[in-house]
Amino acid sequence: MKKIFSSPWGFIPTLYLAEGFPYIIINVVSVLLYQDLGIPNDKIAYWTGWLFLPWILKMFWSPLVDANSTKRRWLLTAQLVLSVLLLAIAGIVAASAFTQVHTVFQFTLLGFFVGAFASATLDIATDGYYLLALTPKDQSLFVGVRTFFYRVAMILGSGILISLTGALTERGYMPKPYNWVVLFGGLGTLFLLFAAFHAAVLPRPQQDGPAVNSQAVAFKEAFAAYFTQKNILYILLFILLYRFGEALLEKIVPLFLRGSVESGGLAMSLQDFGTIKGTLGLCGIIAGNLLGGWLLSKFSFKKCIWPFACALVLPNFFYVYLAACKPGLPIIATLITLENFGYGLAMMALTVFIMYVSQGKYKTSHYAISTGIMALGMMIPSMLSGKMQVALGYEKFFWVTALISLISFAVVPLCFKIKSLEETEQRFKQSRSAKEEK
């Protein structure tokens, strides 16, 4: 038994399950909770949009995580903090039966916000620990394993668990909001078990310790190098605007799917939402990721970027049709799965773009800066989307969003002006060819 848990197979799956849950719970499940509590759409979108902030800022405090204590201790602490916060949110929601909804909203939002910082810290510590605890050979071997279990956590968090939460009330087992109390209480207990299990089984790598003080200086140099690189304006515009339309939909789509018919929504049950959007939709994203990765490796970024941009933008018009025609569940499920598949393809292009522009001496820091900017590109449109939807109604909002999303086509040509993209891709292909020859 000891030998099993000393192997990466004994702890990598659970580490990445634990890393995947908080992001989806904080950014997606919170929206569904607040809708069930009767919070207005504009308020939900604006305030939950702020929850992206810790992922934007994490690049600034990652040197602090490196310079203080061990990655092992940081990740265990983050898991414990998440456990306490999720249990506290369960308790606050339970009190909503005899407390003002406004008070419940404020305190749970504070819990989610602190949880977002804990989750971002968990990301830093877990990924850092992965590099320290595994040999270079095992790092390559387990990269697919860690991605798989991270995705499993997302499917469980926004799909299967949401369906079960809906079933508790829709089948008459318990009234609202106690189904949410069960969900958050169960997640809080799960994170307590994660922390206890990992405290018992995680190896203590010899090199896992505080980094030297030069980390902060190195980060300043990396930050300066990033923003003074050639074509930085094109790089920033692409990262910020490529997903602009998708970012406007991020908070509104769950509200639309579950919104009442009177408000223009589809009145989908929580159980159906978990199955269609949370499970089929995420499976579509994973399928798109896999196909996108294969196409990008077989062809080139510049050959793939236009069709991938079409796959990102055109499915946004599906929501115009859904709002206008309100079809049955089979059509809704098909269109949402296709939309998410296109999003999965497009996200692979953005991921590769960020990887290609994050090269050189400070490539790890540059990647962190790029992903922080990407989160900023999600945060601002998400915060604006609620007021737009309330002012326009769902159908007009989806028309406006679909038309705004055409901005993706305006930033794609910028990629062809960034010479470092082609240079990096050529180096990667040469390196791959050399390995295949060996």
Image: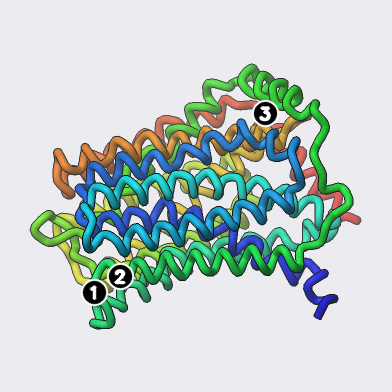
Kindly report which numbered mark, 3 or 2, lies closer to the viewer in this rendering.
2
Q: Identify which amino acid the numbered label 3 is placed on.
A: Ser
User: In the picture, which quadrant includes the C terminus?
Assistant: bottom right
- Quadrant where the N terminus is found in the figure: bottom right
Residue type at mark 1: give it.
Pro
Circle 1 SS class: loop
Q: How many marks?
A: 3
Gap between marks 1 and 3 measured at Cα: 57 Å
What residue is shown at x 85% (from left), y 53% (from top)? 435
Alpha carbon separation for disc pair 1 and 2:
6 Å
Q: Which residue is mark 1?
A: 175
Give the residue at mark 2.
Answer: 178
Front position among marks 1 and 3: 1
N-terminal label among 1 and 3: 1
Work out which residue is located at the far left of the displayed protein and give it: 262
The residue that appears at 73% across and 26% down in the rendered structure is: 216
Direction from residue 174 to residue 83 in the image, left or right: right
Q: Are marks 1 and 2 in contact (CB under 8 Å)?
A: yes
The amino acid sitting under disc 2 is Tyr
Q: Position of residue 255 (x, y in %)?
A: 25, 55
Q: Which residue is mark 3?
A: 420
Distance from the alpha carbon under mark 3 to that under mark 2 = 54 Å
Q: Residue at x 20, y 43 (%)?
A: 389
Contact check, label 1 and label 3, Cβ < 8 Å: no
